[in-house]
Image (tube, helix red, strand yellow):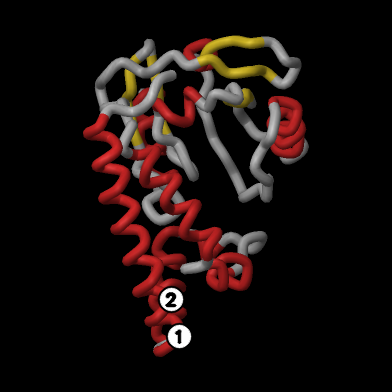
């Protein structure tokens, strides 16, 4: 993987400025009008379902807004979105992934099954494939109703599907039937359910 093209660097610079302004203004507003900003953040959390998850209370996520870690994470997500190559109806990237047994395979190998994620799992950044596999085993302990695989350490699936921090897709026969917006704010599992129900008919 070589250096990004000059156009991508300019886009990244523009996104850096946008995120910096967003965080700076948010921090100032949070300092000047803490209750009003908290109400606004909580109203967004209610709309997206973040505030409804009993394992993920506002005390867990509201205080992290506009922090240094928030800045770097949002910047990483927005930069990744610049490289999004997926389109509804388009060819689904057949990225390499790793089964929990360590066997390497491709994402298309799982298209006969549906993907459904429930609840939130607190997982730290992975430094190697073993960290990533350990985190996936934590997810398995929650008995998901879908196959669990992990991206390689090159993060090709994450990049090509612009999946950070989370994004839902429905793939069938190598095509993208549904491409959700990035979560957690624009995360709508009910849309996935509707697409899957149409496939069952």
Cα–Cα span, label 2 and label 1: 6 Å
In this rendering, the answer to whether 193 lies above or below 99 is below
Labelled pair 2, 1 in contact (Cβ < 8 Å): yes
Disc 2 element = helix
Residue lying at 42% horizontally and 50% vertically, measured from the top left: 75
Residue lying at 34% horizontally and 28% vertically, measured from the top left: 4
Disc 1 element = helix
- Using the image, tell me which numbered label, if any, was put on residue 27: 2
- Using the image, tell me which numbered label, if any, was put on residue 31: 1
In this rendering, the answer to whether 20 lies above or below 123 is below
Quarter of the image with the C terminus is top left
Residue lying at 43% horizontally and 30% vertically, measured from the top left: 159
Residue lying at 38% horizontally and 11% vertically, measured from the top left: 173
Q: Position of residue 155 (x, y in %)?
A: 52, 27
Q: Quadrant of residue 85?
A: top left
Q: Position of residue 39 (x, y in %)?
A: 43, 80
Q: Is residue 143 visible?
A: no
- On screen, residue 126 versus residue 41, left or right, reads right
């Amino acid at each position: 993987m070589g250096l990004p093209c000059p156009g991508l660097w300019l886009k990244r610079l523009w996104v850096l400025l946008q995120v910096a302004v967003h965080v700076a203004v948010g921090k100032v507003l949070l300092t000047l009008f803490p209750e009003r900003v908290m109400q606004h953040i909580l109203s967004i959390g209610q709309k997206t379902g973040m505030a409804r998850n009993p394992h993920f209370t506002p005390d867990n996520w509201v205080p992290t807004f506009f922090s240094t870690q928030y800045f770097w994470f949002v910047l990483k997500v927005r930069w990744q979105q610049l490289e999004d190559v997926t389109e509804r109806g388009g060819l689904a990237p057949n990225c390499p992934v790793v089964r929990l047994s360590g066997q390497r395979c491709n994402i298309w190998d799982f298209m006969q099954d549906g993907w459904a994620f429930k609840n939130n799992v607190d997982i730290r950044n992975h430094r190697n494939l073993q960290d990533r596999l350990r985190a996936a085993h934590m997810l398995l302990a929650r008995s998901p109703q879908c196959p669990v695989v992990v991206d390689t350490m090159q993060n090709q699936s994450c990049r090509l599907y612009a999946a950070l921090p989370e994004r839902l897709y429905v793939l069938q026969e190598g095509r993208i039937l549904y491409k959700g917006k990035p979560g957690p704010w624009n995360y709508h599992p009910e849309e996935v359910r509707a697409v899957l129900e149409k496939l069952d008919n």
